[in-house]
Image (spheres, rainbow, N blue to C red):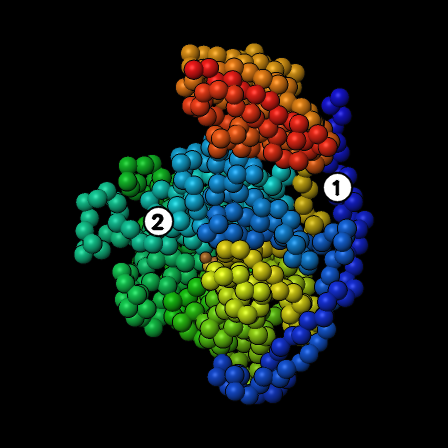
Amino acid sequence: MMNELNDDDLQTVIEEVEVEKTSRRKFLTSTALVGAGAAAVPMSAAMFASTAQAQSAQGCEASVHPGDLDEYYGFWSGGHSGEVRIMGIPSMRELMRIPVFNTDSATGWGLTNESKRIKGDSAHLLAGDSHHPHMSMTDGHYDGKYVFINDKANSRVARIRCDVMKTDKMITVPNVQAIHGLRVQKVPFTKYVICNGEFEIPMNNDGKSSLEDVSTYRSLFNVIDAESLEVAFQVMVDGNLDNTDADYDGKYFASTCYNSEMGMNLGEMISAERDHVVVFNLARCEAALKAGQYKTFNGNQVPVLDGRKGSDLTRYIPVPKSPHGLNTSPDGEYFVANGKLSPTVSIIAIAKLDALFDDKIAPRDAVVAEPELGLGPLHTAFDGKGYAYTTLFLDSQIAKWNVAEAIQHYNGENVNYMRQKLDVHYQPGHNHTSQGETRDADGKWLVSLCKFSKDRFLPVGPLRPENDQLIDISGDVMKLVHDGPTYAEPHDCMMVHRSKMKPKKVWTRDDPIFAETVAMAEKDGVNLTADNKVIRKGNKVTVYMTSVAPTFGLNEFQVNLGDEVTMVVTNLDMVEDVTHGFCMTNHGVQMEIGPRATASITFVADKPGVQWYYCNWFCHALHMEMRGRMLVKA
Ligand code: RUQ
Ligand code: CUA
């Protein structure tokens, strides 16, 4: 009965299907082109707006026919919907949603005992704000193992296991508020997940501080162990922290700071002309940790290192003005800090950081260029061919520019690093290139996550979708090829080639996600794949039952009014794609039970009489008949 399905099958199918790129639709692309050598000095945004609106209408090809498979998996954050979405690229089809910080009635995420165990101390929180999904790496290549995601709203970090595409760990980070920028250590492997505490808070935050005295307010940089998902250490900094990224040498992390003023209102926060990038020296941090050079706060044991100005662990590089995105070029050469309130990005040479930490150069000497790109630069992506693509929020454009030439220009050479400005619709936040945050940046696709869609879609009321636009960057010129309306609010995304992914088709019975439920059954002497049993301990009743399309193992059972009932359902179906559900009507009880999985959910039987339960994932021609009765005796 238990014939194992071969996980290699899917991969084989995927590899065999050739993604065809025949034209499905023609799109007009609006581009502002700058010819090579057109101007000796880069043009300002205003000059572009007035002069260089060269409209070039080009057809473009990016289509995946019905039945064909995409070449890339995209992982999209769901913003304040709290989830992560899997997209197919280049089709931009939404393939799956992974509930993380939200509650999901289809899968029972946030309702089942398994998901509550994973959510741990935050199981009672039903909302979240997911921003930055990033995959674990080995030697700077995606390894297909985990995707990590932050929750700004509740200061959490979660991990998604890519073999089953489910959230399997979650932590509430102590001592901080609002985990924002998140990335992973790229080299030698993702030992650490790095993330920023954005909002400054008193250390300790015990209610004894005032609103006036902000002298004890701090932000912390957080270094989290990728396997245990526990905080390895935190680093206290000056100023706040926004976005972050890691180098390709396993030595440095860098974060932007937009509120170096430590202002508590808007005017104060944007008063300084320069804020900074903080660079963290990993080896020095680990040595300080080992030497016990840390403090603890708020009554917990998490070690907090002191990385404020003057510390050996960090260096502060002044950059203009309220910088936002921090992106490492895939050649490992540069950190790029995006100016947000400055029309520039600041290019920091990673090769100069050793000298900076040895105090042989001044902090600003690590900046090797500061090209002017346009208004509101937020994030930069790379194609692995020497070009960078920066979102210009205020200009509603993406600027394509040459990194080496920007450095030459900074050194006084007569070159024009700007290649093209492409209109996007509208106000882009993040952008991301296919595999662009790894050594495998392949320069095929660029996604622009536009915050506003305005007139691009049928009006759907005051709340509009956002617009995730797909741009072909394989040629010399960026071409807009697809508009993708999305629900609130993809902040960030990443795209990984399908060859790196190996998702399972069915669950294995020893999966850790439901291991505790399996252990509980063993203790109760229940064989989950064979037994259908009701076990009572006082007023706690556990109902074990199997499911095989189209029947549950129990057609009926009885409990008493007020009993706490735990349903444990094991799906015996081994056919891929046959997922069952369990819903107890009128009780807010719903969950998914994947093929060969066990899932459980607990509720109080607070309504007397006959209560029907049914399968709510369509599984069989007799799916409607897949139901049974619970009698609640008063
Ligand atoms: S942020 S729009 Cu949360 Cu990544 Cu830049
Ligand atoms: Cu089982 Cu529907």
The picture places residue 20, in percent across and down from the top left corner, at 79, 59
45 and 286: which one is in front?
45
Q: Residues within 10 Å of mark 2 (few under 14, many from 20)?
A: many
Which residue is at 73% across, 61% downward? Answer: 63
Which residue type carries mark 1?
Leu
Q: Is residue 481 above or below residue 41?
A: above
Q: What residue type is disc 2 on?
A: Gln
Residue drawn at 61 percent across, 61 percent down: 484
Lower position in the chain sequence, tag 2 or tag 1: 1
How many C-alpha atoms fall within 10 Å of the one at disc 1: few (<14), some, or many (≥20)?
some
Q: Secondary structure at mark 2?
A: strand
Furthest-front residue in this view: 609
Residue that numbered label 1 is attached to: 10
Can you give x and y, in whole percent of width and height, for residue 222 in the image? 41, 48
Cβ of disc 2 within 8 Å of ligand 1? no
Q: Is residue 615 left or right of residue 4?
A: left
Left or right relative to 607: residue 399? right
Residue carrying label 2: 177
Quarter in which the N terminus is drawn: top right
Whether the residue under disc 1 has CB within 8 Å of ligand 2? no
Residue 507: image quadrant is top right
Q: In the figure, is residue 486 to the left or right of 323? A: right
Q: Quadrant of residue 324?
A: bottom left
Question: Can residue 361 be seen in this snapshot?
Answer: no
Secondary structure under the numbered disc 1 in the rendered image: helix
Give the CA separation, mark 2 to mark 1. Answer: 42 Å
| Residue 169 place in picture, x, y as percent | 50, 37
From the top left corner, tell me how far across and down residue 12 is, in percent. Answer: 78, 43
Q: Residue at x 68, y 63 (%)?
A: 444
Query: Could you tell me which residue is drawn at 49 percent across and 22 percent down?
Result: 566
Q: Is residue 388 visible?
A: yes
Rendered view: 561 above or below 105: above
